[in-house]
């Protein structure tokens, strides 16, 4: 017998983890995802850590070394190409696509509805009705908002929570490793590589290639370079040659070539020759604005927020997938055991700690308030030994303080 009916909005990580965990507890679920097709690989490696292994295990995924690219540790290049600092930290960079496909295979096609965009939520006696853009209405006992950082569900139930631009964006690169000069690839192949530049650091590592191919020579190299930029500069970077600003993210091919050239010139002026070579070999760099926020409530009557919809941390922590998985598995237990208040309190504590850790790691990038406590914090997190050890660390618990 079903314990109740649950509508899940968003069919990415959080939504799929929730579907698997809730079904295992005897709930009847349906998943409604805006995208009409299978979600594309989000295009980057997922740095593994203890929390991720534990979280995905609850959904039946046993992450093994051969499910990713191995990194032996971290290496920081000085501007002249010499090695300034190294940090041993064996870690597997697994793939978003691999975890997604594993989860998706566990959710039957007749409960996973692609091309379904939530547009409204209506309260109902002892429940809730989800209203979709095509007019479809689905009644349930609970509605779970797993629809990401720009959540429609959150905008409907808690419109006051808006992700805040943190004062820097990331230039990103993701391309065929075969384009990296062999002498450079040899130096960075088994490490997460870092470079320091005024306004933000650069980091890069190898990840699985198309279709999660881990064969050397067929993987991708993934990099990001954080750049301090005020809101006007971000807007300018998101504006295409026709003057259209793509606030939610500019398609890669519409980024104005002169901005890419200016970034490459800056890399030549401030980063190690090895990193310049990687940046120069990248056919189409792209942009990612940095935002973060944490909700003050997760349960709004019959509507519950999880994953990035509930709280989104800066990417330095590398915890988006594990937090989504834990939100989902603990929520399934709380709904089954009628302990939602405790669940909300615990997950809010966790979410706020993850977001705060992201702010610590990014504290030296972006605008610098004239505050001694901030200056001390920023100076600490900018130290090479801290930057290398704490970024997407294998032991998040050591940094979360909870
Ligand atoms: C472009 C991108 C790149 C990322 N890269 C990385 C990375 O490299 N490493 C990492 O750890 N994390 C990365 N993340 C974050 C990571 O993917 C998330 O933290 C993780 O997937 C958990 O997110 P989620 O399921 O809560 O949200 P998301 O993965 O953002 O999924 C939300 C889903 O909801 C759907 N949706 C949105 N609105 C509606 C609506 N109105 N109706 C129905 N469906 C809707 C969206 O189509 C989407 O599939 C990335 C996220 C994005 C968006």
Image (cartoon, rainbow, N blue to C red):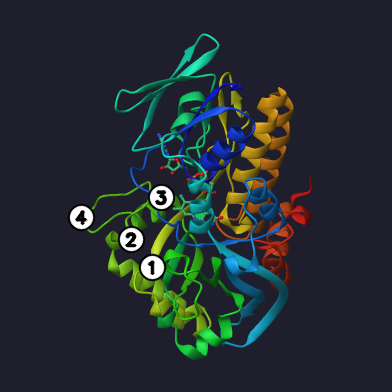
Which mark, residue 179? none
Single out the residue that lies furthest toward the front.
1
Q: Is mark 3 within 8 Å of ligand 1?
A: yes
Q: Give left or right: position of 355 versus 113.
A: right
What quarter of the picture does the C terminus occupy?
top right
Q: Earlier in the sequence, mark 4 or mark 1?
A: 4
Q: Which residue is mark 3?
A: 39
Foreground residue, 237 or 342?
Answer: 342
Disc number placed over residue 242 in the picture, else none: 4
Q: Are marks 2 and 1 in contact (CB under 8 Å)?
A: yes
Give the Cα distance between marks 2 and 3: 18 Å
* Label 2, label 1: how far apart the Cα atoms are: 7 Å
> Mark 4 against mark 1, which lies toward the viewer?
1
Q: Nearer the viewer, mark 3 or mark 4?
A: 3
Residue that protrudes farthest toward the top in the picture? 125
- Mark 2: is the Cβ under 8 angstroms from ligand 1? no
Mark 4 secondary-structure assignment: loop
Q: Earlier in the sequence, mark 2 or mark 1?
A: 2
């Amino acid at each position: 017998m079903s314990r109740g009916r649950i509508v899940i909005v968003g069919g990415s990580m959080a939504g799929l983890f929730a579907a698997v965990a809730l079904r295992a507890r005897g709930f009847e679920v349906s998943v409604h995802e805006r995208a009409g097709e299978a979600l594309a690989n989000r295009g980057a490696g997922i740095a593994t850590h203890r929390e991720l292994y534990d979280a995905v295990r609850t959904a039946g995924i046993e992450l093994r070394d051969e499910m990713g690219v191995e990194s032996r540790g971290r290496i920081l290049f000085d501007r002249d190409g010499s090695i300034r600092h190294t940090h041993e930290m064996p870690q597997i960079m697994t793939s978003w696509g691999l975890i997604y496909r594993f989860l998706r295979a566990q959710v039957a096609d007749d409960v996973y509805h692609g091309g379904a965009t939530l547009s409204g939520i209506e309260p109902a006696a002892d429940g809730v009705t989800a209203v979709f853009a095509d007019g479809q209405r689905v009644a349930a006992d609970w509605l779970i908002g797993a629809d990401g950082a720009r959540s429609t569900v959150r905008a409907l139930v808690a419109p006051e929570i808006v992700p805040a631009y943190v004062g820097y964006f990331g230039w990103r690169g993701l391309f065929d490793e075969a384009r990296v000069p062999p002498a450079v690839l040899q130096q960075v192949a088994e490490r997460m590589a870092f470079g320091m530049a005024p306004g933000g650091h650069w980091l890069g590592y190898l990840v699985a290639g198309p279709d999660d191919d881990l064969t050397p020579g067929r993987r991708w190299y993934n990099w990001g370079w954080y750049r301090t930029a005020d809101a006007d500069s971000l807007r300018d970077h998101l504006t295409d040659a026709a003057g259209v600003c793509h606030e939610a993210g500019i398609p890669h091919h519409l980024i104005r070539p002169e901005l890419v050239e200016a970034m490459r010139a800056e890399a030549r002026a401030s980063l190690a020759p090895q990193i310049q070579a990687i940046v120069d070999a990248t056919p189409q760099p792209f942009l990612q604005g940095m935002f973060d926020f944490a909700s003050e409530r997760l349960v709004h009557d019959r509507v519950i927020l999880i994953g990035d919809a509930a709280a989104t941390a800066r990417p330095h922590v590398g915890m988006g997938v594990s937090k989504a998985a834990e939100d989902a598995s603990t929520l399934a237990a709380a709904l089954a055991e009628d302990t939602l208040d405790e669940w909300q309190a615990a997950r809010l504590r966790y979410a706020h700690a993850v977001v705060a850790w992201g702010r610590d790691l990014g504290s030296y990038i972006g605008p610098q308030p004239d505050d001694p406590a901030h200056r001390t914090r920023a100076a600490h997190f900018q130290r090479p030994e801290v930057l290398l050890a704490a970024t997407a660390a294998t032991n998040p618990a050591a940094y979360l303080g909870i």
